[in-house]
Image (cartoon, rainbow, N blue to C red):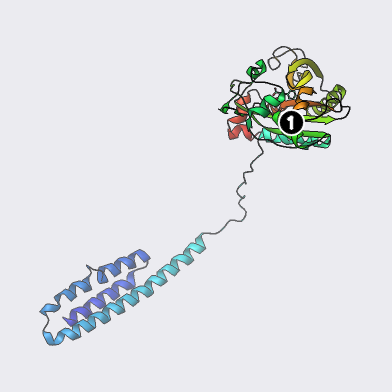
Amino acid sequence: MTNDLEVLLAKADAELQTLQTEEELLSLRTKYLGRKGQLTALLRNIAVIPKERRADFGKRSNEIKDILSDRIDVALKEARNRKRSNDLLRQRIDVTLPGRRVHYGRLHPVTQMRREISAIFSRLGFTVVEGPEVELDYYNFEALNIPADHPARDMQATFYIEDGIVLRTHTSPVQVRKMEKMRPPVKIISPGRVYRHDSDVSHTPMFHQIEGLLVDRGVTFADLKGVLTYFFKEVFGSETVLRFRPSFFPFTEPSAEVDIRCMLCGGCGCRVCGQSGWIEVLGSGMVDPAVFKYVDYDPEEVSGFAFGLGIDRIALLKYGISDLRLLFENDQRFLEQF
Ligand code: PHE
């Protein structure tokens, strides 16, 4: 029986010499030393061996197990090294290949437009301030001279959070909040999101406005015209033509809407300007004395102008975008163009 062990060792050794790869060596190990392997099978016969030789047989079989296991380990290590050097030889790095292109993100067109507009007014000395999007009825309407039963509330399709709390329908409430906190001179602009339930090619339920407010001694409508004319020429070029059209807002008196001559048709009339030759871009006016009363400014001493413009609308015109809703679909193919 001990002889069987020697035969097994010799056989395994001979086989070992012929093997090359890791996989072959691993299956050799299973074949001889595994739970169902040949050495294990021999050991199962220990019962038929005469008692006095059992100890020798056991000892030798343990030795053979160790010898074989060590030899296979050595061969495995060699096989792995061989494979590694082969791989290294074969896999060369081609340093002349072009690199992977880095994909740069871009600022959203509305963000670009907002920054551009803010920069222009900053150059004129306006400070950028912000206010809350969830707003008290008081600031969104009441203190802007729009009492509860005022028909002007219908002009702005309001989202109500609860009684007395709304999603602001315009950025004008920021005027009141700032005037409450500071004394004239006030020279601010306030960009931000506003909400109205409206949705078509030129309306989205959320859009962006920039509010402007200048209050000081002796501010006149001429100042309003001067600032806005300068602003639109900065955005659309020095050829831009403006028209101030009488209008109504409860918080300004007199009020004017500003149109610019359609840059697409030059004023002849086209689809973009609805054949009128003019495009409405902004609401404005001289701050109504009634608003000053709410913030404790003396209308005998100070006067001011205010305006509110849609950032998205300006972006549409500036970049030649045909549908406002494209701005908010976040289709990368669209956004990447800016
Ligand atoms: N808040 C007005 C609107 O959203 C715009 C406006 C602002 C008009 C300031 C006059 C003065 O329609």
Q: Is residue 129 visible?
A: yes
* Location of residue 18 (image quadrant): bottom left
Image position, residue 77 (x, y; %): 41, 72
Task: Write the residue at 15% across / 78% down.
Answer: 46
Q: Quadrant of the N terminus?
A: bottom left
* x then y, percent, for residue 108: 65, 36
> What kind of residue is marked 1?
Gln
Judge whether 252 appears above or below 70 on screen: above
Residue 158, percent from left and from top:
60, 23
Quadrant (top left/top right/bottom left/bottom right) for the C terminus: top right
Using residue 18 as the reference point, say whether residue 158 is left or right of it: right
What residue is pinned by disc 1? 175
User: In front here: 27 or 170?
Assistant: 170
Residue 55 location, x and y as percent?
18, 85
| In this view, 292 is above or below 257 | below
Name the residue: 23% across, 69% down. 37
Residue plotted at (69% across, 17% down): 272
**In which of the image's four quarters is ligand 1 placed?**
top right
| Nearer the observer, 103 or 97 | 103
For disc 1, does the CB lie below 8 Å from ligand 1? yes
Q: Is mark 1 on a helix, strand or loop?
A: helix
Question: Left or right: 60 with respect to 326?
Answer: left
Query: Foreground residue, 257 or 78?
Result: 257
